[in-house]
Amino acid sequence: MVTLDPPWHPPSWSLDPSRPLYEQIARLIRIELACGRLAPGTRLPPVREFAAKLRVTPNTVMRAYLDLERDGLIETFRGQGTFVPRDPRVVTASRRALAREAVAYVQRIAESMGMTVEELIRLAKGEEEGGCTTS
Amino acid sequence: MVTLDPPWHPPSWSLDPSRPLYEQIARLIRIELACGRLAPGTRLPPVREFAAKLRVTPNTVMRAYLDLERDGLIETFRGQGTFVPRDPRVVTASRRALAREAVAYVQRIAESMGMTVEELIRLAKGEEEGGCTTS
DNA sequence: GACATTGTATCAATCGACTTAATACAATTT
DNA sequence: AAATTGTATTAAGTCGATTGATACAATGTC
């Protein structure tokens, strides 16, 4: 009755032991959402199925879904499943959120080094120095 | 015989429980170094003293110092202490390293969203959308 | 040489976040 | 009723980070 839009298959999975699994799973979905590969209305895999595919416990997937739902990026309905909201503004918001988070990060670094983000980028690209050069 | 340049007092310390202490300590020093507040030749506080000030174990500070030494950012001499190398290129290198790390981070995010860094920054600043907009 | 200072090394123990595993319950669809 | 799916709970296990204590090594000072 509610098999909404196209199914979604998670992309190839790579494990990064340095961060919690649930966080990586959530991040994976955030990115899929932000870049449009996960369209509004799409149904996510059930927790058990997704867990089996990733070789983790349903609990772990559950925790990822919870994080995403707290941020309003997905909606869940008992007995039906977990979905990306139909409202396309959710995708827009997720793009913005990811971008803001990333930019805020470099901004903190740049600020603590007494530079602007643009200067930081130029420095990283290696064209010039910061000001402590000799020799 | 070797009391080198001016002493250095660690800045006000703020705890971030989400990352290991030794990593935060190392990062603190990296930033101090990169922005010039920790000049070449400066002696860092002895592990025990620094540990006492931060209310942690000397072991933890030790580990931070080890990380920094592996990256060539500091030099240690038994019985003398731990120092920022006199070679000013170390500061330059640390600036570059921090900048590269930060920029690489946003680049990964941007790439996974199918954008350039410049586009990501503009998006974060909120002037425009990514392409999924309606309503 | 004796002593103080500082870095280095090691080990056992603790703590906490993360994860597993098993199980039961709740809502919806068929 | 049965199947599917999300939700909740509890106990246990794992692992990295941190502590605390202690001993050792190199350098400088007296």
Image (spheres, coloured by chain):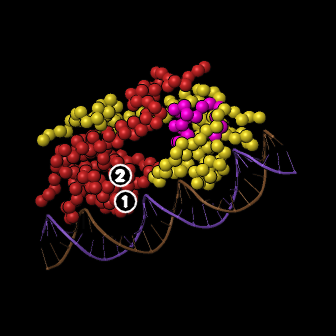
Chain colours: A yellow, B red, C brown, D purple
Amino acid type at circle 2 is Ile
Asked whether the viewer can see residue B121, the reply is no
Label 2: which residue?
B25
Give the answer, above or below, for where B42 lies relative to B92. below
Which image quarter is the N terminus of chain A in?
top right
Chain of residue at mark 2 = B
- The residue lying toward the viewer, choosing from A85 and A36, is A36
Choose the circle earlier in sequence order: 1 or 2: 2
SS at mark 1 in the image: helix
Q: Position of residue D8 (x, y in %)?
A: 70, 51
Residue A82 image label: none
**Does residue A33 show up magenta in the picture?**
yes
Q: Position of residue B114 (x, y in %)?
A: 46, 31
Label 1: which residue?
B60
Q: CA separation, marks 1 and 2?
A: 9 Å
Which of the 4 image quadrants contains residue A128?
A: top left
Magenta residues? A27-44
Q: Position of residue B31 (x, y in %)?
A: 31, 44
Relative to B55, C28 lies left or right: right
Asked if marks 1 and 2 fall on the same chain, the answer is yes
Question: Who's the residue at 59% across and 54% down the image?
Answer: A56
Question: Who's the residue at 39% across and 27% down the image?
Answer: B118
Question: Who's the residue at 56% across and 48% down the image?
Answer: A22
Chain of residue at mark 1 = B
Asked whether the viewer can see residue B66, the reply is yes
